[in-house]
Amino acid sequence: MIFFEELDLLRSINDPIHGVIRVSMNEMQVIQDPLFRRLHHVRQNSFLYKVFPSAKHTRFEHSIGVMNYAHQMFLAILENGYTARIRGDIAESSEFYGALDLGVGVDLSQSLSQNGDTLKQTFIELRLAALLHDIGHGPLSHLFDAFAPNIEEFMLILRSDEMINKDTKFIQRMEVLLEKYVEKQLEKGNKDIRIEHEHVSSYFTYKVLNRTVGVTKEQIYNILTILKPELSLGKRLISIFDREFDVLPILNDIVASAPIDCDRMDYLKRDSYFAGVPYGNYSESRVLKSMLAYAKNDGKIRLGLKRSGLHAIENFLQARYEMYVQVYGHKTNEACRAMLNFVTEENGLNFVKWSKKSLTANDFEELYTSLTDEEFVNHLMSELGEERRSALRDIKDRNLWKRVYEVEEFIDQKDKKTLLSECFSESFDKMKEEFGEEKFKIYTDERFPLKDMDAGAQLLEKSTRGFYVISPVKIRESSQIISSLNNGLRIMRLYSVDKENATEYKKYAVQNIMPLLNDVANKREKYVPN
């Protein structure tokens, strides 16, 4: 184990995906913190267990698994860089538009290079960032975001925290971060703007690390920058070719970057394992072998993926696509999601009303630690009107809306409206006219497996001189398989709220609507809207 003594990896946790995971004493302090322990009671996939009964795993064990994969990824980058340099695939001088050896040999535990201590600190900060990446997640995954504090409320919470409010640099950077976030939301037309779990993660990361013995302010700033680069609180400089480069950008790539990061690597394997399906499996060793560090003249080290490892990348992306289609997008799981969306549409539900107290930091932490998945549902039950309370009760009892019919199509991110979606919408209206307004709900889900691809890792290929350099070809355009996954998948489903007569509605849809939808989907017939 790299830097076994230096990293203080003296404790261990047994995990069904990774086996024994070594952890340091500082990491154990974080794991034992109440804000982290609450993740024991926040399921990774909300109500997925209604479809796959064993899928009750939580964000607690996922976070520990992500930390382990982060370590493996950075270790692979170091070893691959060393191997590439020995083979002559990396220049021995300043070629700052290509792959780099970070300056150490395979026997990293000797720490003999000039970057030895820097690499040790890099591993410490990377592992803690990966461990804490989900600490701000509310119950029931992203659905809690609709009930989170708004921007003003959140800033009141931050300023009331005696641990935080003296750090003017952190407060100011959070204010700037939130201002930019508000601007983006307003551009999208959103008016009721609430903080996202990433904002809470930044706040809780600061709190947890500040009360972790042995973690310095510099480390806290670096870890926050890894998790949220926009905060720009820190740097971790490493010397290469007599020039200093910031290593934090590649650590952000490792933790949260398309198309491959330690978060995705863990949840695909973990979700697949606990759901009891093979779809999320991929060749871990081949994926790790494809990774290299690279740098440009901007002074930042980033994650690159070797073109020779393209098939491993394809395999990974296919696994992610299959999990979205076969597991996350399962009709029953989507029925739960559709019903929850219906439940959360009710007006007047907000964080302040639930808190029953003033918005202070202590109250916020106390409420957050108590809001498990089950407590969140109980809060909803006590606040909802009868119609939505009944829907939530049906979710708990697995008395779900029944799918009447569905269609799917591949779309571009700009395809807001298509011929098929227009036809589906009019079919929905026809069903309501035939059987009644209150009998049906329409639910559309759009998935983009390759979203944010251009902001992540770059493809590296051999130059005419035989060195790895940045390819002019984007990863999304690098192969026929990846290009075919470039389009998003839109699934439109019509659910029957009236469960008893769902069979009758389905029979009507099959006879009167499905043929028309199939014609449009297969482009055999031009659809003319009424």
Image (tube, helix red, strand yellow):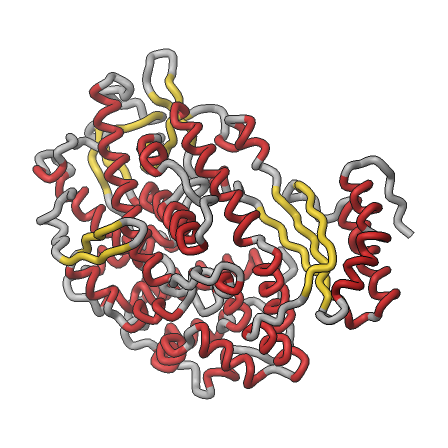
The residue under the point 46% across, 49% down is 277
- Place of residue 236 in the rendered image (x, y in percent of width and height, measured from the top left): 24, 45
The residue under the point 16% across, 66% down is 213
User: Which residue of the protein is positioned furthest toward the bottom in this rendering?
Assistant: 356
State the quadrant of the N terminus. top left
User: Which residue of the protein is positioned furthest toward the right in this rendering?
Assistant: 530
Q: Is residue 317 left or right of residue 99?
A: right
- Place of residue 506 in the rendered image (x, y in percent of width and height, measured from the top left): 77, 59
Q: Taking the image as drawn, is residue 380 in sight? A: yes
Compared with 310, 396 (above or below) is below
Nearest to the observer: residue 530 or residue 358: 530
Compared with 88, 435 (above or below) is below
The residue under the point 14% across, 51% down is 7
- Place of residue 182 in the rendered image (x, y in percent of width and height, measured from the top left): 54, 61
- Place of residue 135 in the rendered image (x, y in percent of width and height, measured from the top left): 36, 64
Compared with 240, 446 (above or below) is below
The residue under the point 81% across, 56% down is 509
Q: Quadrant of residue 193?
A: bottom right
Nearest to the observer: residue 501 or residue 494: 501
Q: Is residue 283 left or right of residue 343?
A: left
Q: Is residue 464 left or right of residue 384?
A: left
Q: Taking the image as drawn, is residue 344 in sight? A: no
Compared with 270, 105 (above or below) is above
